[in-house]
Image: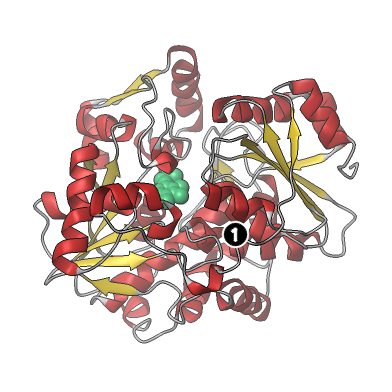
């Protein structure tokens, strides 16, 4: 299996290469050169399989000869064996056609664990027996950082440096990062905001002298292996609801377009789907792009769904690649235009191609609150605000057939917003007990590029 960059000018890599690389050297994102296809018979054969068995069948064609079947199975068993539900991603029925797919049974209570628990194992496997040492650097507003730290804590061959804005992540999110005692975990509280953290990380990757001293690596959702892991639950859920004979719709709370792109990837592999609903909050660049062709970043509005508060949606480039006829040079030119003007316009023809799969939806604060209240009062389900954005779409849009809303976080991760909407303060699941008693470990560093690089350089392992 070979992977190519969306911008057409980076080396073609195998699965090991794309897993360790992240962003392509031409600034693009990696995608398979040819999509593996599963027939209706292959999909029907997934009936009754466990999550791990389904994952083996979906992921194996993307791995090529970088892992044996036994190695892949072993990594999947370890990644999902630690989830708090034996079904890994259970489906919960809300009414005669609405379902929730609970993706939050991993260690940090958000769907990012589904991908990152596997990615940690893949990193370790691909580094074993080499002299390479990864220095993973990231910035987080909460969910990504905790999931990434949990995924790599204590693993050989890598260190992780995670920057968070001091005093601006929730206590649950901070403790999920800072109570991990592994020696390869370095939490940095930056005296600035999330945008400052992100800017510093970007600058480190772009600083050739610094980057050259270490093997810097990223774990954000541009990493292909993360998306690959997410394709699995679309197959697993759809098959349980009758695929390939039934077309299931998915309502996906979206920020960086990673999760919903995984659904599109499932469709490209042959899974018959209904609509893929791209549900955004009022930071609606994606909904606007799909509804009217206007992909332009505006001013960020902080909401009760911080993990979807984005201005630029990094994985949208993967869809744009298809909308530009898979012409890397044409897309590179379009992205250069976007980077200069912060806007890109989709032609009527490109919008029509996207509309084959995607339905946009924008939920404001009232719609989100109403969805949380409906779930709590009518169905007895307490849901998190991100999930509520998806459910608002699922209940509002005219969709044929079953609708699965991806439940991307456990409500206890956002207790204040849940309590405001429903009057009920959700408690942490039993497996997270003790989070508030454990010792925290982090260092505060000034909001200063040189100070941050010096901090990392003093602790990282040279390339
Ligand atoms: C990251 C995140 C999202 C957005 O996912 P994308 O893949 O970036 O679209 C939605 N909900 C929660 C809880 C998240 O942590």
Residue 353 placement: quadrant: top left
Q: Residue at x 83, y 33 (%)?
A: 455
Residue lying furthest bottom in this view? 48
How crowded pointer 1 is (Cα within 10 Å; few <14, some 14-19, many 20+) is rated as few
Residue 165 location, x and y as percent?
Answer: 60, 33
Work out which quarter of the rendered image holds the N terminus and state it: bottom right
In the image, 224 versus 180, the foreground residue is: 180
Residue 403 placement: quadrant: bottom left
In the image, 277 versus 325, the foreground residue is: 277
Which structural element holds mark 1?
loop
Q: Residue at x 64, y 52 (%)?
A: 177
Q: Residue at x 80, y 21 (%)?
A: 450
Residue 381 location, x and y as percent?
Answer: 25, 66
Numbered disc total: 1
For disc 1, does the CB lie below 8 Å from ligand 1? no
Residue 432 placement: quadrant: bottom right
Q: Image check: 151 left or right of 262?
A: right
Residue 292, visible in the rendered structure = yes
Q: Residue at x 46, y 60 (%)?
A: 230
Residue 366 location, x and y as percent?
Answer: 19, 40
In the image, 135 versus 408, the foreground residue is: 408
| Colouring mode (rainbow / by chain / secondary structure / one colour) | secondary structure
Residue 80 location, x and y as percent?
Answer: 55, 74
Does 317 sit above or below residue 240? above
Work out which quarter of the rendered image holds the C terminus and state it: top right
Q: Image check: 137 left or right of 383?
A: right
Residue for badge 1: 436
């Amino acid at each position: 299996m070979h992977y190519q960059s969306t911008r057409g000018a980076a080396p073609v890599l195998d699965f090991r290469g794309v897993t360790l690389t992240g962003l392509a050297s031409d600034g693009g994102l990696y995608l398979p050169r040819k999509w593996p296809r599963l027939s209706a018979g292959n999909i029907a054969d997934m009936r009754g399989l466990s999550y791990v068995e389904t994952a083996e069948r979906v992921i194996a064609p993307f791995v090529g000869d970088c892992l044996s079947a036994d190695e892949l199975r072993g990594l999947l068993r370890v990644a999902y064996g630690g989830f708090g539900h034996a079904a890994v991603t259970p489906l919960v029925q809300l009414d005669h056609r609405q379902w929730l797919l609970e993706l939050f049974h991993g260690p940090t209570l958000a769907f990012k664990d589904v991908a990152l628990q596997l990615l940690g194992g893949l990193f370790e496997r691909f580094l074993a027996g080499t002299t390479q040492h990864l220095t993973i650097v990231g910035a987080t507003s909460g969910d990504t950082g905790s999931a990434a730290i949990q995924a790599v804590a204590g693993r050989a061959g890598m260190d992780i440096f995670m920057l968070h804005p001091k005093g601006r992540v929730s206590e649950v999110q901070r403790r999920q990062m800072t109570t991990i005692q592994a020696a390869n975990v370095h939490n940095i509280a930056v005296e600035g905001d999330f945008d400052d953290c992100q800017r510093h990380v970007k600058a480190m990757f772009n600083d050739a002298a610094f980057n050259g001293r270490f093997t810097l690596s990223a774990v954000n959702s541009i990493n292909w292996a993360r998306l690959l892991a997410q394709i699995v639950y679309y197959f697993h859920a759809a098959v349980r609801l009758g695929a390939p004979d039934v077309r299931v719709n998915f309502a996906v709370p979206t920020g960086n377009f990673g999760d919903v792109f995984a659904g599109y990837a499932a469709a490209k592999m042959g899974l018959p789907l209904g609509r893929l609903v791209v549900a955004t909050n009022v930071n609606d660049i994606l909904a606007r792009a799909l509804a009217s062709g206007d992909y332009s970043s505006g001013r960020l509005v902080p909401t009760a769904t911080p993990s979807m508060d984005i201005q630029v949606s990094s994985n949208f480039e993967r869809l744009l690649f298809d909308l530009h006829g898979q012409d890397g040079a044409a897309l590179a030119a379009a992205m250069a235009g976007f980077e200069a003007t912060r806007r890109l316009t989709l032609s009527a023809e490109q919008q029509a191609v996207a509309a084959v799969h995607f339905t946009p939806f924008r939920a404001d604060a009232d719609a989100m609150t109403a969805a949380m209240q409906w779930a709590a009062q009518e169905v007895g389900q307490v849901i998190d605000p991100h999930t509520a954005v998806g459910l608002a779409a699922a209940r509002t849009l005219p969709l044929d057939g079953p609708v699965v809303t991806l439940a991307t976080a456990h409500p206890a991760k956002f207790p204040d917003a849940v309590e405001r909407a429903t009057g009920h303060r959700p408690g942490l699941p039993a497996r997270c007990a003790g989070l508030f008693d454990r010792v925290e470990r982090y260092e505060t560093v000034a909001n200063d590029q040189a100070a941050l690089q010096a901090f990392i350089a003093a602790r990282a392992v040279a390339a």
